[in-house]
């Protein structure tokens, strides 16, 4: 126990002295190490350490069918390539220090191949706790508090449907905003009218190949790296025990693109530069006995600095929103209707200018395909339902009718030739404990 | 069959006389608390307060989401709905930011676990209370 507390004190006390980067680099190995040794060390204390561990997990399988375009695999022919598995543990090491970690395997068409990875691994250090509120910090790999659903978007039971609302929680660049390696502080105030909940911090984002594909159009020889700290935070007010929830959340991050010689070849070659991404989400929700109403709005501004090529002076201002009404017929049966919309450029919602520029570009450089206007937006109506077969098992079905292809992943579709109008039917069976 | 009869009685009572048959809050017999505010109770059952004021760990016990006693407790004492609590717990458990309460199957198990666990809190129907646990007031 002594060794363990010294380790943690060391980790905390080092932070103002050593560079943040060093600490954060060590954090991953430190947290894994501590997770491994802690049960052994604490067992010596002759207390029931087993009683202080909680294990939970989930498993979900979906089937996806689309009339056109691919979503989560070869869905035009029916795809079963959407499988999620996770297991997590939480352990109270000391009265004020808890450790938690989750392993996640996610198979999502061509976007994610299912290899298990560390979803989060953190220490929760509680500094102050009373009946009035609490204050503390998470250290390690932390899920980013964005919108109402980002942190648990991979757990079917905590989502609103088979998929997260793509207009807000884009799966094509999910890893970028999913989590970060760093520190986040939390403070909560339990007021008579409701709870005020803050969580904010800094950390290094975790971009993957999908991010490069989505923001830079293809896989380049160079790399997008995440050596700059990102800022993330959420303020939330839960009125009357959560009857009404209001939240403002966001992230701001810079990604450096380090080009290689091969990337600069030709008139549309690109060079080193950076991407600055600002992501803001406004959320509100009403939770009644039968009705649940949800509205979320996301603004995403992407600035391309010095990258050149097609991205010279590019600056996209995307907008997405979702409106949903959910009705509980009984504790076990519910149905919902949702409107989702996403616009790549909120000043050119239906992509007319975008399409015109694309034609001009094609005239100059015939090898650049013409992008149709509908590849810059996506509007859907979704109707669906859920059946809680038992407390832990849930079945879902939903039907989407969509105009536009902006939420499709370029790793699964040839975007310039993706169809404008397409429908989707999806079912899922999910378990969690 | 006995359980079915009991559940029907509870549901009947809750429909026709919700104030008379409200659940009572129970804690471990050594717990010094005598009453807890609604605000405080919401935070405790949402698993947002890890410790009692003396620093000892709080251990929360609940019945399953669809159990009529849980539904009624959540609705009438906490002023919430079971699905809201469930979402708060799930969000905490699956993001690593918190934990979930211990789920018990029956009132008997609730009474036994609360009576034997230091720092425990739970709820029961008044007729299921005995000397092994302490009843405290939840001010509305």
Image (cartoon, rainbow, N blue to C red):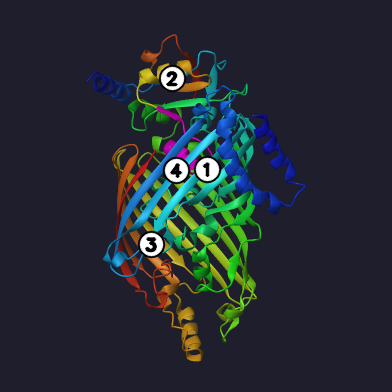
Return the residue at label 1. A101
Task: Kindly identify which residue carries mark 4.
Answer: A87
Residue at the right extreme, as displayed: A17
**Which badge, 3 or 4, comes first in the chain's sequence?**
4
In the rendered structure, the answer to whether residue A381 lies left or right of residue A55 reads left
Q: Which of marks 3 and 1 is nearer the N terminus?
A: 1
Q: Distance between the residues labelled 3 and 2?
A: 46 Å
Magenta residues, dominant SS class: helix
Q: Mark 2 points at which residue?
A: B113
Mark found first going from the N terminus, 4 or 1: 4
Furthest residue in direction top, as rendered: B131
| Crowding at mark 4 (Cα within 10 Å: few <14, some 14-19, many 20+) | some
Secondary structure type for disc 1: strand
Q: Does the magenta stretch include residue B99?
A: yes
The residues tagged by marks 1 and 2 sit, at their Cα atoms, a distance apart of 28 Å
Magenta stretch, residue numbers: B84-103
Point 48% across, 26% down: residue: B60
- Relative height, residue B79 to residue B36 (above, below): below
- The residues tagged by marks 4 and 1 sit, at their Cα atoms, a distance apart of 8 Å
Q: Distance between the residues labelled 3 and 1?
A: 25 Å
Q: Work out which quarter of the rendered image holds the N terminus of chain B and state it.
A: top left
Q: Residue A190 in the image: x percent, y percent?
A: 58, 34
Subunit under mark 3: A
Q: In this view, does A25 lie above or below A357?
A: above
Query: Contact, CB < 8 Å: mark 1 with mark 2?
Result: no
Question: Which secondary structure lies at badge 2?
Answer: helix
């Amino acid at each position: 126990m002594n060794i363990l507390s010294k380790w943690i004190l060391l980790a905390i006390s080092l932070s103002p002295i050593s560079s943040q980067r060093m600490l954060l680099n060590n954090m991953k190995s430190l947290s894994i190490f501590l997770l491994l040794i802690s049960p052994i060390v604490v067992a010596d204390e002759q207390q029931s350490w087993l009683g202080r561990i909680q294990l939970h997990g989930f498993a979900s399988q979906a089937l996806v069918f689309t009339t056109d375009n691919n979503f989560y695999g070869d869905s035009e022919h029916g795809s079963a390539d959407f499988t999620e598995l996770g297991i997590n543990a939480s352990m109270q090491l000391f009265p004020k220090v808890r450790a938690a970690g989750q392993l996640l395997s996610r198979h999502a068409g061509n976007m994610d191949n299912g290899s298990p990875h560390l979803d989060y691994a953190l220490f929760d250090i509680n500094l102050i706790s009373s009946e009035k509120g609490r204050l503390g910090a998470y250290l390690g790999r932390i899920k980013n508090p964005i919108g109402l659903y980002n942190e648990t978007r991979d757990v079917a039971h905590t989502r609103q449907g088979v998929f997260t609302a793509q207009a807000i929680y884009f799966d094509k660049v999910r890893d970028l905003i999913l989590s970060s390696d760093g520190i986040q502080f939390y403070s909560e105030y339990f007021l008579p009218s409701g709870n005020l909940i803050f969580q904010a911090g800094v950390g290094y984002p975790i971009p993957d190949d999908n991010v490069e594909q989505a923001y830079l159009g293809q896989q380049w020889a160079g790399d997008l790296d995440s050596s700059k700290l990102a800022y993330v935070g959420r303020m939330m007010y839960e009125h009357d025990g959560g009857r009404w929830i209001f939240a403002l959340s966001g992230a701001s991050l810079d990604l450096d693109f380090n080009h290689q010689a091969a990337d600069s070849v030709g008139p549309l070659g690109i060079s080193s530069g950076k991407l600055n991404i600002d992501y803001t989400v406004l959320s509100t929700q009403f939770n009644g006995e039968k009705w649940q109403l949800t509205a979320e709005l996301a603004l995403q501004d992407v600035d391309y600095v010095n990258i050149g090529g097609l991205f010279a002076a590019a600056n996209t201002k995307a907008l997405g929103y979702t409106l949903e009404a959910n009705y509980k017929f009984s504790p076990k049966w519910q149905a919902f209707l949702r409107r989702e919309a996403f616009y790549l450029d909120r000043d050119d919602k239906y992509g007319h200018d975008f399409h015109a520029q694309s034609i001009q570009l094609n005239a100059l450089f015939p090898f650049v395909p013409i992008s149709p206007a509908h590849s810059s937006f996506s509007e859907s109506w979704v109707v669906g339902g859920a059946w809680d077969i038992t407390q832990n098992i849930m079945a879902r079905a939903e039907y989407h009718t969509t105009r536009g292809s902006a939420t499709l992943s370029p790793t699964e579709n040839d975007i310039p030739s993706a169809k404008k109008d397409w429908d989707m039917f999806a079912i899922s069976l999910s378990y969690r404990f | 069959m006995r359980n079915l009869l009991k559940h029907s009685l509870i549901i009947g009572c809750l429909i026709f006389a919700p104030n008379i048959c409200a659940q009572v809050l129970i804690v471990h017999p050594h717990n010094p608390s005598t009453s807890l505010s609604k605000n405080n109770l919401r935070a405790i059952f949402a698993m947002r307060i890890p410790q009692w004021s003396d620093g000892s760990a709080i251990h929360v016990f609940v019945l399953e989401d669809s159990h009529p006693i849980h539904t009624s407790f959540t609705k009438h004492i906490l002023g919430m709905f079971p699905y809201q609590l469930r979402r708060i717990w799930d969000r905490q458990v699956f993001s690593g930011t918190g934990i979930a309460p211990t789920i018990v199957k029956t009132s008997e198990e609730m009474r036994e676990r609360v009576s034997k666990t230091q720092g425990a809190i739970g709820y029961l129907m008044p007729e299921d209370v005995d000397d092994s646990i302490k009843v405290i007031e939840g001010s509305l």
